[in-house]
Amino acid sequence: MATIEVTEKNFNDIADKGIVLLDFWAAWCGPCRTFGPIFEKASAKHDDITFGKIDTEAQQALAQGFEITSIPTIMAIRDGIVVYAQPGALPAPALEDLIGQVRALDMDSIRSELAEELKKADQN
């Protein structure tokens, strides 16, 4: 599957389904241009994952909403929950490792932990 352009208009439709990897980037960013082909190659290899690119210049509200202060930033979302977000270009082996870790997550456990945190926050 090729990467798709993610915008404010299509973000919610994309982010709620399965595993989504997002690349926050900009055309002027050298490390972004270096990472782009690695991200594209991974997208061709993992057709069960949605790979999206968010141009931080064109989609400033999304970048601000996720508090993106450095690019490239890689974000992994699984079942609508952000499970990873780190700035910096990843080499191909590290991206593959990240994909493996996201696939292996116990989402029921993560949802339980989030529910507990929300419950504690509501009590305070």
Image (cartoon, rainbow, N blue to C red):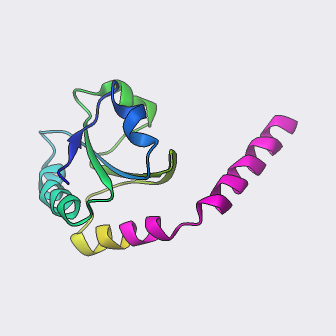
Q: Residue, x 81% and y 43% (percent of image)? A: 119
Locate residue 120: give its quadrant: top right
Q: Residue, x 21% and y 66% (percent of image)? A: 45
* The C terminus - image quarter: top right
Q: Residue, x 31% and y 26% (percent of image)? A: 60
Locate residue 92: give its quadrant: bottom left
Main secondary structure of the magenta stretch:
helix
Which residue is at the front of the view, 93 or 12? 12
The stretch drawn in magenta includes residue 111: yes
* The N terminus - image quarter: bottom left
The spot of residue 103 in percent (x, y) is 45, 67
Q: Is residue 104 above or below residue 32?
A: below
Q: Is residue 92 above or below residue 20?
A: below
Which residue is at the front of the view, 19 or 73? 19
Q: Residue, x 15% and y 63% (percent of image)? A: 41
The spot of residue 91 in percent (x, y) is 23, 69
State whether residue 83 appears in this view.
Answer: yes
So how many labels did they put on this image? 0
Which residue is at the front of the view, 10 or 90? 10
Locate residue 15: give its quadrant: top left
From the viewer's perspective, tell me whether residue 37 is left or right of residue 23: left
State whether residue 63 appears in this view.
Answer: no
From the viewer's perspective, tell me whether residue 41 is left or right of residue 113: left
Q: Which residues are magenta?
A: 98-124
The spot of residue 82 in percent (x, y) is 50, 49
From the viewer's perspective, tell me whether residue 14 is left or right of residue 36: right
Residue lying furthest right: 123
The stretch drawn in magenta includes residue 120: yes
